Image: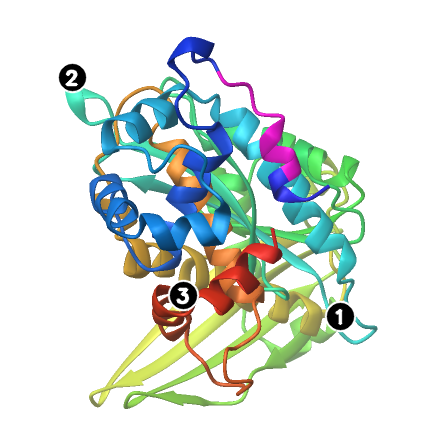
Amino acid sequence: MTLLDAMEEIEDYRIDLCKKHELVDILMICLLGFFIGLTDIESTAFWAKKQKDRLTRVIGLKNGTPGADTIHRVLAMIDDKQLEKAFFSWTHGMFKANPPKKDEIEVVALDGKTIRRSNTTGGKKGAHIVSAWADRLGIALPQVKVDEKSNEITAVPELLELMDLKGVIVTIDAMGCQKKIVEKITEKKSDYLISLKGNQSTLHDDVKEFFSRDDKKFFEKFGVEEFTFGIEKDHGRTEKRDYKLCTSLGWLEQKDEWANLKGVGMVKSTRIAGGIKTVDVRYFITSLTHVETAAKSMRSHWGIENNLHWILDMMYNEDYTQSRKDHSPQNPAVLRKIALNLFKTAPNPTGKANFSLHKKQITCMCDDDYLKTMLQLL
């Protein structure tokens, strides 16, 4: 099913007599605005009005372009779960159509992000969304909004339930270090690597004490494996990451309380910047048994921060989005991810390997043929 087909199934709650613009046309106008780098509905509606003739050629609008008030009203009205379902159907197809090669690992990272200026009226918190990221493909997967009276711990199992994760390595930061979440990942026939911090104080303290021995003979006794990424240099900073993984867990009292727990580990990051040396030590639990796979999975997890959250803020100013009413914070968040996935997967206009997302946006702004190429991916 194409994304446009899935969008056609979204329920339109407007009265038929009041429908001047088709629902899919309104959603497409929003997507086109994101394609060219616009960050708010007012600018998108203004641009669409000025580009009416061009947009009619590209997407065939029947009744012109909608105004900002209409777009806001529709985005607030649409059930975000239905739009997320359409997004999921589309991304699931992309995910399954591009399986990993034999030497590749498939990591899906889960992480939460608050759209800080949304839903802030009346003392409410900004809309908080837990997203999934397929690191190998570099695309966003489904998202789930965290209920105002709930937290990420309840949202993560709901997000996991949406996806077919058989054979995938799921990575989560310390908020996901919960027995029910580990059980759900195991039910999905997935492996996991989850950061371990003070929210699981006893487990954290036991793992920390084990690795604090730093005794070669002691580690050999328990079959601890080690792996080190080469020293990395970037912007005057050097960094080295040393990983250790222990899969002989007879010493760990809580080992049977966690589904499919096969290893505990640590990573020691040593950074030198401006002549100042800093050392950071973190711990994790995992169902993986090979230290190199664990190290690569843990490193891949940060792709959701660097390649999803950061880009959404830089390209679309997401943190400063002030949509507040009903479903309006969540629905544009889905549309932004659709646009980002298209930019990630669309061919470069010049055929060159190095072509930034920003340059693709500029090309969409002035080249109808390239814009049509993007839309054909839907």
Region of the chain picked out in magenta, as a range: 5-12
**Left or right of 238, for residue 153:** right
Percent position of residue 344, x then y: 53, 65
Residue at the disc numbered 3:
364
Q: Nearer the viewer, residue 231 or 366?
A: 366
Q: Nearer the viewer, residue 321 or 215?
A: 321
Answer few, some or many: residues within 10 Å of disc 3's Cα (few below 14, many 20 plus, some between 14 and 19): many
Query: Magenta stretch: residue 7 in it?
Result: yes
Residue lying at 44% horizontally and 57% vertically, measured from the top left: 308
Are the residues tagged 1 and 2 within 8 Å (C-beta)? no
Answer few, some or many: residues within 10 Å of disc 1's Cα (few below 14, many 20 plus, some between 14 and 19): few
Tell me the CA gap for discs 1 and 2: 56 Å
**Left or right of 315, for residue 360:** right
For discs 1 and 3, the disc positioned in front in the rendered view: 3
Residue at the disc numbered 2:
122
Tag 2 secondary structure = helix
Residue at the disc numbered 1:
223
Tag 1 secondary structure = loop
